[in-house]
Image: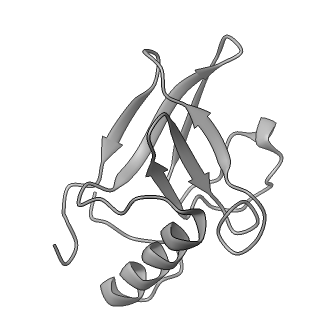
Amino acid sequence: MKFFVPAAKDNIKAEQVYSAIAKSLKAPISEKRIWKLQWRDREIDMECEVGKPLPSSYQTGKELVLAIFECENLYKICTLSRGGVKGEPILVGKNSQSSITYFLDNVNH
């Protein structure tokens, strides 16, 4: 899957939006961008993917995941109202039961 940010009309805009979100969250910007995250939460297997809604248990409705950032000991998942434009991102702790899939390209890097 090629790197994108939902609703960004081109690669340049996608980079700008991604960088702005990272800066506001104090999240590192890496060459490797996360496309999909799988984890276990309270004995339930969870999954999110950039461009798709979060599992219903997060009550974000049909908001799409804009970006997923890998921080020191956790992941920050952003939708429009959860870390994207306002609010706090969804935090998922890193553990042995979490796994990530990266975008296949490294846009502008």
- Image position of 44 with respect to 90: above or below: above
Is the image coloured rainbow, by chain, by secondary structure, or in one colour?
one colour
Left or right position of 94 against 89: left
Quarter of the image for the N terminus: give it: bottom left
- Residue 108 occupies quadrant: bottom left
Report whether residue 50 is seen. Answer: no
Query: In this orientation, which residue lies closer to the viewer: 5 or 85?
Result: 85
Query: Which quarter of the rendering shows the C terminus?
Result: bottom left
Image x and y of residue 54, in percent? 66, 46
Q: Residue at x 83, y 46 (%)?
A: 59
* Residue 14: percent from left, percent from top: 41, 80
Residue found at x 79% / y 35% = 57
Examine the rendered structure and indicate whether residue 66 appears above or below residue 57: below
Q: State the count of labels.
A: 0
User: Residue at point 64% right, 69% down?
Assistant: 84
Left or right position of 78 against 82: left
Residue 61 percent coordinates (x, y) = 80, 55
Q: Position of residue 10 (x, y in %)?
A: 36, 88
Task: Answer above or below: position of 42 versus 33.
Answer: above
Is residue 104 shown to the viewer in this render? yes
Nearest the camera: 89 or 102?
89
Write down the quadrant of residue 16 in the picture.
Answer: bottom left
Q: Is residue 77 left or right of residue 102?
A: right
Question: Residue at the location (48% across, 31% down)?
Answer: 38
